[in-house]
Structure formats: C-alpha cells, structure tokens
Amino acid sequence: MEVIPQEIQAFAEQHTTGEGGLLYRLHRETYLKADQPHMLSGHLQGRFLTMVSQMLRPRRILELGTYTGYSAICLAQGLGEDGHLHTIDVNEELEHISRRYIGEAGLADRITLHNGKAADIIPSLDEIFDLVFIDADKAGYSAYYDMVWQKLRPGGFILADNIFFHGEVVLPAEQQSNNAKAMVRFAEKAIADDRAETLLLTLRDGLMLIRKK
Ligand SMILES: C[S@@+](CC[C@H](N)C(=O)[O-])C[C@H]1O[C@@H](n2cnc3c(N)ncnc32)[C@H](O)[C@@H]1O
C-alpha cells in the first residue's frame, strides 16, 4: 500500500535540505550491496532525525538497529558536547560499511557499534539516555520499550520507526503480517501508557514520537 502519494513525497524531498555527499554515497552503496535497502531511513526521515537531534542536543542516544549506519550518522549530527551514541545490531555483516562511513563522517569516537541482540545488550549499557531510536526487529518493539524506559530520563524521547508497516496496520487483522500485528500492539501499548505522550507522524512508514513525562 502506498502510504504517502509519490507526488507529495517528491515535493517534500524537493523542499528538504539535501542529505549531503557522504549520506548520499552511503545511501547508494546500501542499495548496491545490502539486502532490503528500503530499511534505510533515507533523505527525508534522515533530515528529520538530524533536526530532532539538533533541537534536543542529546548527551546520550541509543539506537536499536544500525543496519548500514545511515540513521546513526543522522542522529549523531545533533549530539551535544561530550555526546555519545550507542547503536546495536545483531547482524555484523554490514558493520564494515557502517564503520567506514562513521569514520569518514568524523564520528568514530562519538558512536559505539555493538554487535548482538538488542535484548542482550541493552541491560549492559550503564547510561541514562535522552533519546532512543527503536528500529530493529518489529516483534521486539514492545519489550524494547519496557527495557529502555528505565534508562530514559524524564522528559526524554523514544522514536519508533515503521509503525504503519507499509500500511498493513489498517488492514483487517486476518490480512496483517505478524510484523504489522506487532506494530499495532506496540502503538496501542504506547498510547495506553499514561507515563507517556505520543505523536504518530505520517512520515515515511510511520514514525512515533514518545515523550517520557
Ligand atoms: C530497519 S533496519 C535499521 C535501519 C537503520 N536504523 C536506518 O535507518 O538506516 C533494522 C536492523 O535491525 C537489525 N536487527 C534485527 N533484529 C535485531 C535484534 N534482535 N537486535 C538488534 N538488531 C536487530 C537488523 O539486522 C537490521 O540491520
């Protein structure tokens, strides 16, 4: 299902600051070399992540789902002074790409790449986060929400990607994939949580902003 009409998407991209040469090359290399390149955040969402990060100037960011490093670089572009981003991915096959671009972006000492399952690594991080980006396996979102909540400072934000799951979340339940069902459960959990405020943006594949009160 086309969630955002192509013409509107193109107009939005034409009126959004470019991603810059390095991210453009990473985007291209991901499409040439990686499986499922549509997973990469891309121009519009990438600029959104950078702008949110620039507004917050976070000291600590946690990302679940590094992939080729595109969103990690976007988020790290807004880090505050002494800021650091931890990013986790279970798949180490793409780490050579993310590590190379993070180095080229001059962010090697500001981003730590963790290889392993998010559920195993999150408890080992002795940090309080200002911003968490959840973009790993969809079945894990609800558990990750609970795990990161304790590590999120009051007033901090969780951003969760792919909530629309290609538009499947509005189909009858019997036509939804397991991932779409997981996204519906996650969205319902977040909106029912009175410790949180939520905003589900119709950006790309549905990006939910959650603020810890
Ligand atoms: C949608 S992609 C991330 C895209 C990236 N954030 C971006 O915007 O460019 C999802 C990533 O989550 C990773 N992943 C899947 N299951 C995971 C798990 N249990 N723990 C950590 N990472 C996982 C996959 O290997 C994949 O690279």
Image: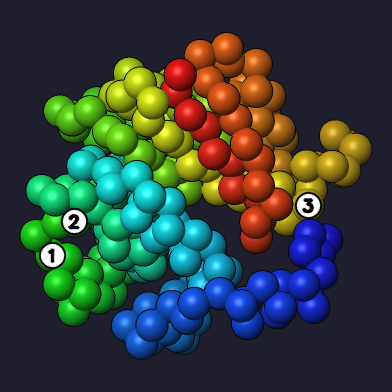
Report the amino acid beneath label 3.
Answer: Gly
Using a 10 Å C-alpha cutoff, classify the residue at mark 3 as few (fewer than 14 neighbours), some (14 to 19) or many (20 or more).
some
Report the amino acid beneath label 1.
Answer: Ala
> Which residue is at a point 38% across and 83% down the rendered structure image?
20
Q: Position of residue 17 (x, y in %)?
A: 49, 77
Q: Position of residue 95 (x, y in %)?
A: 26, 66
Q: Which residue is mark 3?
A: 167
Compared to residue 115, the image places residue 6 above or below, namely below
Using a 10 Å C-alpha cutoff, classify the residue at mark 1 as few (fewer than 14 neighbours), some (14 to 19) or many (20 or more).
some
SS label for mark 3:
loop
Q: Which mark is residue 108?
A: 1
Task: Please state if 92 lies on the left or on the right of 53 as rendered.
Answer: left
Label 2 vs label 1: CA separation? 6 Å
> Which residue is at a point 27% across and 33% down the rendered structure image?
129
Task: Please state if 141 lies on the left or on the right of 3 as rendered.
Answer: left
Label 3 vs label 2: CA separation? 32 Å
Using a 10 Å C-alpha cutoff, classify the residue at mark 2 as few (fewer than 14 neighbours), some (14 to 19) or many (20 or more).
many
> Which residue is at a point 39% across and 60% down the rendered structure image?
50
Residue 165 appears in the rendering: no
Q: Which residue is mark 2?
A: 111
Nearest the viewer among 194 and 133 is: 194
Task: Please state if 20 lies on the left or on the right of 46 as rendered.
Answer: left
The answer to which image quadrant residue 134 occupies is top left
Dot 3 or dot 2: first in sequence order is: 2
SS label for mark 2:
strand
